[in-house]
Amino acid sequence: MTIRTSYRYEDLSVGLAFRSPGRTITDADLVGFSGLTGDFSELHTSDVYAGASQFGRRVAHGMLGLAYAHGLMWARTGELRETAIAFLGIDDWRFVGPIFVGDTIFVNYRIAELRDSRSRPQQAIATFDVELVNQDGTVVQRGRKALLVSKVPLDAVTASA
């Protein structure tokens, strides 16, 4: 895994791998996400119901894991702050295991594809293979994310505007 504070386009290459900082899932996360989304499924909100489920205890919403994965990758690391322009989409995202209250999640991601934008010569598209893992290294979610990146450092773009 590579550790750096910020990458410019010329630093990026297929195979370059990253690992996010960790984030421990709390009861407040489940309660807050339920309130935000309106998803008050008992699997997330009732110890009794979830205790009788195949998981044996409450699990985090799958979309909560996906949202935290996105935040851990882009906002929290800052690795692409001079490069990232826009999140373009998700491909083949899978929820493969539960996330429990008390789990600490990390994101392992690597550049799988890097190609020039067809319509904008100063931009490119970086596609990442992404794994959301828990503290034991167990993959709980995985898929691909695409990001529009600038070939010109963004601090230079904003300074010249």
Image: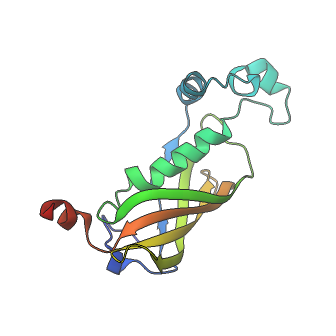
Q: Is residue 20 visible?
A: no
With respect to residue 33, does 156 lie above or below?
below
Which image quarter holds the C terminus?
Answer: bottom left
Q: Compare residues 151 and 93 and report the one nearer the observer.
A: 151
**Left or right placement of residue 126 versus residue 121 in this view:** right
Q: Is residue 47 left or right of residue 53?
A: left
Residue 2: quarter of image: bottom left
Q: Is residue 44 left or right of residue 1?
A: right
Which residue, as the protein is rendered here, is positioned at the far front? 119
Q: Residue at x 55, y 31 (%)?
A: 26
Q: Nearer the viewer, residue 61 or 137?
A: 61
**Place of residue 15 in the rendered image (x, y in percent of width and height, measured from the top left):** 52, 79
Question: Residue at the left extreme?
Answer: 160
Tell how many labels: 0
Q: Quadrant of residue 52?
A: top right
Q: Residue at x 72, y 29 (%)?
A: 58
Q: Quadrant of residue 121?
A: bottom left
Spot occupied by residue 144 in the image (x, y as percentages of width and height): 61, 63
Name which residue lies at 80% across and 32% down. Answer: 56
Residue 32 vertical placement versus 132 (above, below)? above
How does the figure colour the protein chain or chains? rainbow
Residue 159, image x, y percentages: 14, 61
